[in-house]
Amino acid sequence: MSSLSYNDNSVSAVAEVGDEIQLSLQGITKVFPGKKDWMSKLLRRTSPDFMALDEISLDIKHNKFVSIIGPSGCGKSTLLNIIAGLASPSSGTLLMNGYSLEGPGPDRGLVFQNYALMPWMSVEGNIAFALETVAPTMPKVQQKRAVKENIELVGLTGAEKKHPHELSGGMQQRVGIARALAINPQVLLMDEPFGALDALTRGFLQEEIERIWDQQRKTVIMVTHSIEEALLLSDEIIMMTRGPGAQVDEILEVPFPRPRKREEVETHPEYNNLKLEMEQHLYRETRAVEKSRL
Ligand SMILES: Nc1ncnc2c1ncn2[C@@H]1O[C@H](COP(=O)(O)OP(=O)(O)OP(=O)(O)O)[C@@H](O)[C@H]1O
Ligand SMILES: [Mg+2]
């Protein structure tokens, strides 16, 4: 049975798989309101409402590595931000372990594409700041230990006192990952975490993230544009349709054994079929977006 089910938000469907489900999205819709105020009307600059997501329902099981892929602008970041609690859905419900989620919380850690580090803070300062914000009552000794352990985990020992401008893009993203993991979230959310990196660094960090995931076994939800990256890292790949009103088109199960080695994954008998299916999906959806612009 698939560990993910979608577009079925009935209570019985949730109860059937019981407590294995960690995160349940039920009918998540997001409408960005258009401009309709009197000033916009006066200047003839009104705009209609925009429905980015249309009734997305998904169940994500514990400890799975799930990727979200879809044409540019379809609503992947909007969906991830809703899960992170940084944006609220216009309608629908988000449940974590059966409980309703509202707003951000320490149970979810977010890694941004552009690192989003505090430039005036050192590596350890950035991580400690996240801990102080999320767990202000944590004793200093424990906080220091969490900072140290996570710096070690992402391979940045020796760079603790450096500031972001002294680090390469890959190292900055390691800080971003350490910062998200330091709060010990149940779910790690990553929005195109390696998108801004060169191919070599990207490949290296992909391997690192698999190692970290293997060690920590957290649920990971990663938005990516890269088919190869999704196939290398994921247990399941959620393919979204184009917007407006994006939905889940299909969920692919990735059967490759773990730990994964890039060469073994790429020579797996299922690799080319899955890759082709994803390419066709992205091509079809992107072409439809381009056509609608003509
Ligand atoms: N604050 C906003 N107000 C109005 N529309 C928005 C807002 N944020 C996003 N959108 C629109 O919602 C749609 C989805 O945006 P989103 O950033 O989630 O897409 P995406 O799939 O992450 O794109 P990309 O692959 O380029 O990162 C886009 O059409 C975007 O223009
Ligand atoms: Mg995005």
Image (cartoon, rainbow, N blue to C red):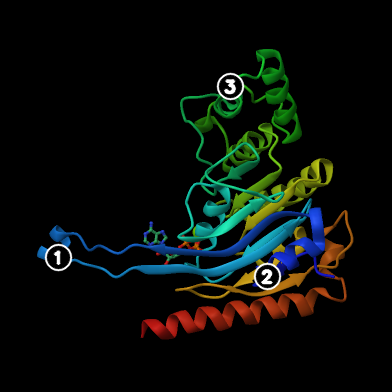
- The reply to whether the residue tagged 2 has its Cβ within 8 angstroms of ligand 1 is no
From what the image shows, is residue 280 above or below residue 258? below
Q: Residue 85's spot in the image, x, y percent?
A: 53, 47
> What residue did someone put label 1 on?
41
Residue annotated with mark 2: 6
Q: Classify 10 Å Cα crowding around label 2: few (below 14), some (14-19), many (20 and above).
A: many
The answer to whether residue 193 is visible is: no
Residue type, label 1: Lys
Residue ID at (52%, 72%):
246
User: Horizontally, is 46 left or right of 72 in the view?
Assistant: left
Q: Quadrant of the C terminus?
A: bottom left
Query: Circles 3 and 2: CB distance less than 8 Å?
Result: no
First in residue order: circle 1 vs circle 2: 2
Look at the numbered disc 3 and say if its residue's Cβ is closer than 8 Å to ligand 1. no
User: Percent x, y for residue 242?
Assistant: 51, 75
- Res 133 → quadrant: top right
Which residue is under mark 3? 136
Q: In the drawing, does residue 143 fall left or right of residue 53?
A: right
Mark 3 or mark 1, earlier in chain: 1
Sequence order check, earlier mark of 3 and 2: 2
Q: Quadrant of ligand 1?
A: bottom left
Q: Residues within 10 Å of mark 3 (few under 14, many from 20)?
A: few
User: Percent position (x, y) of residue 260?
Assistant: 85, 57
Q: Residues within 10 Å of mark 1 (few under 14, many from 20)?
A: few
